[in-house]
Structures are given as C-alpha cells and as structure tokens.
Amino acid sequence: MKVVMIGAGNLACNLGVALKRAGHEIVWVYSRTGTSAKYLADLVQCLFTTDITQLPTDADLYVYALKDDVLPDIVKQVIAPQAIHVHTAGSVPMAVLAANKVRYGVLYPLQTFSKQRLADFHSIPLFVEASDAVTLDVLLSVARQLSRRVYEADTCQRKQLHLAAVFACNFVNCMYSNAERIVQRAGIPFDVLLPLIDETAAKVHYLTPAEAQTGPAVRCDRTVMDRHVADLEDGMQRNVYRLLSEDIYVYNNLSNKNHS
Amino acid sequence: MKVVMIGAGNLACNLGVALKRAGHEIVWVYSRTGTSAKYLADLVQCLFTTDITQLPTDADLYVYALKDDVLPDIVKQVIAPQAIHVHTAGSVPMAVLAANKVRYGVLYPLQTFSKQRLADFHSIPLFVEASDAVTLDVLLSVARQLSRRVYEADTCQRKQLHLAAVFACNFVNCMYSNAERIVQRAGIPFDVLLPLIDETAAKVHYLTPAEAQTGPAVRCDRTVMDRHVADLEDGMQRNVYRLLSEDIYVYNNLSNKNHS
C-alpha cells in the first residue's frame, strides 16, 4: 500500500519503519516541525512537508500519529475520499474520523516508543477497530504483517487499555524515578536497582501481580512501614508511600478473602 | 566455611543454594516451621530443626534470614562466640547483633526472591557491613564468591536502599496489579501488557527515569488526565492516578528547570 504518515513523533517513527519493513511504500511524511518530518522521511526514504495541504490525495492509507488534542483539526484538513484513514491514539474514539471520511479505523500499538530505539514490532500487541467489515479485513491483514499479536478492540476497550498503560508504564517509571532519588541521596548510583527492576518485571510473566506482591504492606508490617515513612525526607514520597501501601493492603486482603 | 541458615523463606533458600554452589557447606537449617526447614535442608542436603537450641555451636558462619520483628529475639538464642553472625535485612541496623556477638555483620542482597525460581546470584548487588576490619574482609570475600557486584554500605545507606526497593519493586508491582484490574474489567487478558512492562524496565537501562518518562502527566495534558480520572471506576485508582500524575508533573518540571 502507498502510505502517508501524518505525525513524526516516537510512535510515527517506529510505525513508519515497521510498515516499510513489511513491504509498504511510505510516500510522504507530514509534521508541523520540519526537523521531525525530515527525520522520519530520511528513515523511510520519502518526501516530507510541514504544509498539510501539500499531501498527495491518492495514497491508500493515511496514518495519523498525533497528539490527541490536534488530531480532530488535522483530520479535517486531509482530503482523500477513497483511502483508509487510521489513527493510533488509545484515548481517542474512532468517531473522530467519521466527520469527513468514508473508510477509517484505529491501529493502536500497546507499547512505549522512542526514536532512539526502534522497536521490534512483531511482539507488540496491536488493537484494531474499523468503520466497516471490508476496512476491518484490510487493517487486520496490515496489522498481522507487523505483529504476531493482533486483536480487535472497540473504542471503549481501547480507552481502558490506554488507562492500564498509564499505570503499567508511566506510573511504573514514576516509581523508578522516586527510587533513583532515594538512592542518589544516599550516594549510591541508580544502576544497583536494575537487577531488582528486571526481576520485578520478569516475575509477572509467570505469577499474577497479586501472587508476586512482596514487601511490608502486603505483610501488614506496620513497624517497618512507620519507620519507612519517618525515613522519607520528601513529603510527596511520604504521601505516595502511604497511599500505595494502603492500596496493596486493601486489595490483597480483598483478593485473599475472595480466594478463601 | 561451615554455614548455619537461620530462616528458610524466599531469601534464605536463594542465599543457601548460592552459598553451597560457591563451595560452602551448609550444615544445619533452622526454621520455626518444619516444612520450610525441610524444604531448604533438602535443597542444600543438610540437617534441619525447628528447635533453635539444637543448632551446633561450632559452625563458622550463622546467616539470619528472618522477618525483621523476630530477628532480635532469635539472635539472642544462638550461642557461637567464635563464629561470624550476619543478618540479611535491609531495614534492620547491624547493631541488633551487637548484644551477644563478637564478630558480626550484614549481607544484604538487593533483589526480590521466590522459592519457585532460584536467582542467579552473580548479577545481584550485595551490600556488606561488618563489626570490624577482619570480619569485613571475610564477608567481602564470601560476597565476591556469590556476586560480581559487591559494595560496602552502612546501616543508614542500607535503610535507604530498602526504601528505594519498596518503590522499585513493591510499588511497581502494585501498578502492575492496578493495570491488571483495569484490563480485566474490559475483558482483556493481563498478558497483553507484558511487552509494555518489559520495555518500560528495559528503557531505564539506557535512559534516566526522568528522560524515559512519557504519558499525559509529563506532557501536562489536562484533557486526557481529566478524562482518565472520570473513566476510572475505582476510587482508590482515581486517588493513585491524581497523586502520581502530580508527582510526575512537579518532579519533571523541577528537573527541567534545574537543567535549563
């Protein structure tokens, strides 16, 4: 298929390269900023523009990988009635494309992307939604060229996936950041925590998070928890410590009751 | 060295096996519960007891891998004046061993352990503290037989390491647990999140957590955050979402200011 990439951020770069590797031709890249547009255009060897009205109207697939709030406005400016238009955003309803498009859908990869490190798409779960059965078939087959793990998900499920991703990625990274600040204050480099971080992620491949939970909160060890809160120098860290300990305590007590 | 293992939980099993593999002889295992004591004794092929007074007095090294609150009481009951006594607890001062021991110290492995999955000790950071220079040398050399990553750390640093581990392991797992509940409510299995979980951990091997931070909070995307809070069905999850978003927002704004 002839593909136009609209957006040239982390996700666009990773998806653009994956589409090209799967045999599709990326014909144009649009981005508001010239350097971003050129970066992706160089990666996939195609033309680029910062003027949305310059995009060709005869491509087969238009991929919108943009920030949620600019998506509706940009979508309106792209005219290509015969093509399939897909966005890639977890939190945005498919209906954002319904206004002036005939065939449209969503291709949502559940992953965190960086330009510096191009992802192997084959293991990334892709969630597909489409305006109609024929378009769904096309998008599913494109998705299956990119990944072994393709699922259908409606707008409502995708919203929940995106929410879960905030917890499993953004908030997890926030915990890494807090841990870094604590060891650095003690004069210890962050990298001593990496084996623990890796093993914590590895554990939930074969245990449920409830089974994998360890630490003072799940043991209801008040003595250690009180000492920990007293030892934290940062007020925000004390609040986070208290709230997440309560979360662990309450949830694990509930789930143990349900299992007994 | 002839080693007595006092405690037979997750950490004791992993450390006992690692010590045996490094060429030491585990001579006895003590645990309050017979099945636990037998489990570790079978792993390292030695005798076991649930009666602390039965332990031999002529071993070289006594390793206390016990819950924090029972440690002081058990320590008092072990009589072996010529031996080295070490505990393995992050939050407990070395001084807990000073009451009736001459040579003592701490060997703290920064890792989360399961009996079901014996860890490769070679990559686990080990933090050592000792009562005197001669004992320190012995403990450092034992630690270096077990791991490539051996550090000295005093009681104060070890306390901070343990606190950091609560954030990097226990609270991270709590985030996995919340993500699991969110996708399950949408009828989607937890394992779709595993590639994201793995990549989030992999990223902080080559980026700092601040550089790796993504998501609506670091972008200050109020629209998405408000929608997310509204979409969360669980009150505790709404509180966690708000607090951690504030943490990400405040910290990343501070660190960007410091860098500019």
Image (spheres, coloured by chain):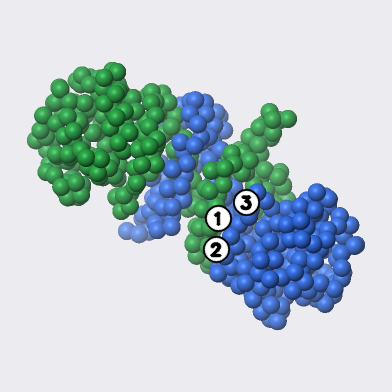
Chain colours: A green, B blue
Q: Tell whether A24 sits left or right of B11.
A: left
Nearer to me, B174 or A245: B174
Which residue corresponds to the image point at 26% horizontal and 29% vertical from the top-left? A86
Q: What residue lies at 46% left-to-right and 47% top-to-bottom?
A: B198
Q: Are marks 3 and 1 on the same chain?
A: no
Q: Position of residue A92 (x, y in %)?
A: 33, 28
Q: Secondary structure at mark 2?
A: helix
Query: What's the distance in space between the residues labelled 3 and 2, CA to CA?
Result: 15 Å
Secondary structure found at label 1: helix
How much space separates mark 3 and mark 1, taking CA atoms?
A: 14 Å
Q: Which residue type carries mark 3? A: Arg
Residue under label 2? B123
Alpha carbon of mark 2 to alpha carbon of mark 1: how far? 10 Å
The residue pinned by badge 1 equals A196
Q: Are marks 3 and 2 in contact (CB under 8 Å)?
A: no
Identified by mark 2, the residue type is: Ser
Residue B159 spot, x, y in % from top left: 64, 61
Residue B117: mark: 3
Checking the image for residue B172, the label placed there is none
**N-terminal label among 3 and 2:** 3
Asked if residue A250 is positioned above or below residue B128 in the image, the reply reads: above
Query: Quadrant of residue A121 in the image?
Result: top left
Which sits in the foreground, A230 or B25? B25
Report x, y in % for residue A195. Answer: 53, 58
Q: Residue furthest bottom?
A: B134
Q: Amino acid at mark 1?
A: Leu
Nearer to us of marks 3 and 2 is 3
